[in-house]
Image: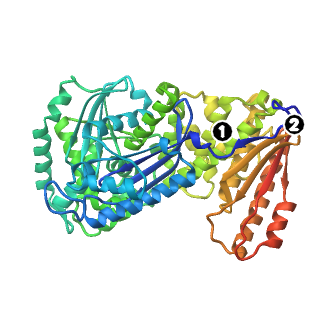
């Protein structure tokens, strides 16, 4: 075995992202508070590890004055939510300098907003930055650019509908040329016009038009001579896009268990004025059963979606919008991007176009929970990949581009679950290979990533597998190496009895060792935890056998010392176990 490092020195490689690569943003919105934790690198590229959203509803139960005051109930809930967020930041070891907490319309407008800000600093230990409307709009634009880097050179109008305000920003080349914030949000409009199930849509439309007209925002936008693209972001607009995607306005499609035809898989994140009107018409339909249908589809957003969708339709009308692109990123990601810029310097958005097409596809078909799982899987795979590349034989056959394929396959391996659990790995392959979502990759690269996702489960493919025939021997070897890493990463992630956050990859004269600690946050009795440990050993051992099929690598799973001790010494309060994987270059 030839190692790049000194054979007599054991080097520990961090399993999960080192604390310096973790960044976080907290968005204290009118409707909800959102915590975003990402893993970033100096290029400015980042991957979401955790995204928590809690409905605090600062605008509800407030005093009926103008301006309003945040109620005691909302005040206490805000503190409790932020303390929970702070605990999560501590558990992820996000350093304070990499965390930024911002507040928007509700705290900006509330008569007692400063009291909440001071209380948060004193009791939770978080510095809250209250954004002006223009600053909020600028950061929203910055977030959109991370999701849609190709719009950088275009004159773009970005619209963000929040709970207490709507932001408009015109930007080009990364610079916000104009920004405005109007006191029109889905929460305050719901409070004013949607009460006890009665939709005063006519009055709401008149009010919206009056506020927009008095603001002069339409005239300011038209001064730029016509924008090249309109982009919408945040919860309301993304919910409308989801409704269009699932055919919410079409009963025959929507009622069929949310089935989306294959032709719709190729649909980008956008919708037209006609499609928006169809959703609004259905939302305002007073027929029997419509509320239950709306509640089922929009869940917690159901209470506010009518006001939000009507507001968006009126914006389309007064500005003359025919089509809207949709960004999966908004204020929170804009805050992250600005933090990265201060730490790492400027980033090349064009360099992230390829990777963002992967993220967009993953977000299109994965639920939020599935995205967290996929991100964890990608994190495990990256640790193994980077550790193994310390071996000269491995380093010669795998490069940084291969790491991109590996992480992409991990993010996308379960997108086929969108169509049901049976044979979902095959559906993942079809979506990746034939959906046309991945931009900047060659046909062979797309096929490679699709096959990695396809073979993350079931039988490990042989070199002469029919799907690999078109590949050269070099690519076949690369594929099998990456596939083995994907499979063990998926197997490890699936078993919550291990603590992925405490993975350690070390190198010494004996080889490589991946050591995974116990899951300290589980409260399982030994009788329930033991089967999980057995499953972990069995599944991981089976997947590790695949490494023996890779020419330059073999693996050993250290059972006896670890699990023997677990089974024989485990008491009521003892759930501690660790298992070790040795990777040996041969």
Instruction: Name the residue rendered at 35%, 37% in the picture.
Output: 139
Instruction: Name the residue rendered at 66%, 61% in the picture.
Output: 519
Residue pushed farthest front? 122
Is residue 437 in view? no
- The color scheme shown is rainbow
Write down the residue under mark 1.
406
* Rendering quarter of residue 548: top right
| Residue 265 spot, x, y in % from top left | 48, 44
Residues packed near mark 2 inside 10 Å, few (<14), some (14 to 19) or many (20 plus): few
**Above/below status of 546 relative to 396:** below
| Residue 193 spot, x, y in % from top left | 16, 59
Tell me the SS state at disc 2: loop
Left or right, residue 281 beside residue 3: left
Left or right, residue 351 beside residue 468: left
Is residue 553 in view? yes
Foreground of the two, 331 or 220: 331
* Rendering quarter of residue 567: bottom right
| Residue 30 spot, x, y in % from top left | 29, 54
| Mark 1 or mark 2, earlier in chain | 2
Q: How far is disc 1 from disc 2 in space, using C-alphas?
A: 30 Å
Write down the residue under mark 2.
8
**Above/below status of 154 relative to 102:** above
**Residues marked 1 and 2 touching at CB (< 8 Å):** no
Tell me the SS state at disc 1: helix
Figure quadrant of the C terminus = top right
Figure quadrant of the N terminus = top right
Left or right, residue 112 beside residue 88: left
Foreground of the two, 134 or 261: 134
Residues packed near mark 1 inside 10 Å, few (<14), some (14 to 19) or many (20 plus): many
């Amino acid at each position: 075995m030839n190692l790049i490092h000194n054979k007599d020195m054991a080097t520990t490689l961090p399993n999960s992202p080192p604390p310096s690569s973790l960044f976080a943003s907290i968005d204290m919105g009118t409707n909800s508070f959102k915590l975003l934790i990402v893993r970033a690198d100096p290029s400015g590229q980042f991957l979401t590890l955790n995204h928590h959203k809690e409905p605090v509803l600062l605008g509800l139960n407030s005093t009926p004055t103008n301006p309003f005051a945040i109620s005691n109930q909302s005040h206490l809930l805000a503190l409790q939510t932020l303390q929970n967020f702070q605990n999560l930041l501590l558990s992820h070891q996000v350093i304070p300098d990499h965390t930024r907490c911002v507040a928007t319309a509700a705290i900006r407008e509330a008569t007692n907003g400063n009291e909440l800000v001071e209380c948060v600093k004193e009791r939770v230990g978080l510095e809250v930055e209250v954004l002006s409307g223009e600053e909020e709009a600028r950061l929203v634009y910055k977030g959109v650019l991370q999701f849609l880097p190709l719009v950088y050179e275009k004159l773009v109008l970005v619209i963000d509908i929040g709970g207490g305000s709507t932001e408009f920003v015109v930007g080009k080349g990364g610079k916000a040329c104009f920004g405005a914030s109007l006191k029109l949000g889905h929460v305050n409009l719901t409070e004013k016009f949607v009460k006890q199930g009665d939709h005063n849509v006519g009055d709401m439309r008149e009010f919206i038009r009056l506020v927009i007209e008095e603001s002069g925002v339409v005239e300011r936008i038209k001064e730029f001579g016509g924008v090249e693209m309109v982009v919408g972001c945040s919860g309301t607009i993304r919910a409308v896009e989801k409704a269009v995607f699932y055919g919410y306005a079409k009963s025959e499609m929507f009622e069929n268990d949310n089935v989306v035809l294959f032709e719709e898989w190729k649909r980008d994140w956008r919708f037209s004025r006609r499609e928006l009107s169809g959703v609004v018409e259905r939302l305002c339909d007073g027929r029997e059963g419509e509320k239950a249908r709306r509640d089922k589809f929009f869940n917690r957003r159901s209470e506010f979606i009518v006001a939000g969708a009507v507001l968006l339709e009126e914006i389309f009308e007064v500005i003359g919008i025919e089509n809207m692109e949709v960004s999966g990123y908004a204020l929170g990601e804009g805050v992250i991007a600005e933090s990265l810029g201060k730490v790492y310097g400027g980033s090349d958005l064009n360099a992230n176009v390829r990777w963002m097409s992967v993220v967009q596809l993953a977000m299109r078909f994965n639920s939020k929970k599935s995205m967290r799982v996929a991100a964890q899987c990608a994190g495990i795979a990256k640790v193994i990949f980077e550790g193994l590349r310390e071996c000269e034989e491995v380093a010669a056959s795998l490069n940084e581009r291969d790491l991109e394929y590996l992480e992409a396959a991990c993010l996308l391996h379960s997108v086929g679950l969108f169509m049901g659990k049976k044979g979902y790995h095959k559906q993942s392959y079809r979506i990746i290979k034939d959906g046309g979502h991945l931009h900047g990759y060659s046909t062979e690269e797309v096929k490679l990533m699709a096959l990695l996702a396809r073979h993350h489960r079931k039988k490990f493919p042989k070199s002469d597998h029919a799907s690999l025939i078109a590949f050269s021997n070099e690519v076949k070897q690369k594929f099998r190496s990456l596939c083995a890493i994907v499979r063990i990463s998926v197997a490890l992630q699936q078993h919550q009895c291990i603590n992925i956050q405490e993975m350690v990859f070390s190198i010494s004269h004996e080889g490589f060792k991946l050591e995974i600690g116990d899951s300290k946050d589980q409260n399982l009795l030994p009788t329930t935890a033991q089967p999980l440990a057995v499953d972990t050993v069995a599944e991981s051992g089976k997947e590790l056998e695949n490494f023996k099929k890779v020419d330059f690598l073999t693996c050993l799973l250290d059972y006896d010392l670890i699990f023997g001790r677990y089974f024989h010494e485990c008491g009521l309060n003892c759930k501690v176990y660790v298992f070790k994987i040795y990777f040996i270059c041969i």
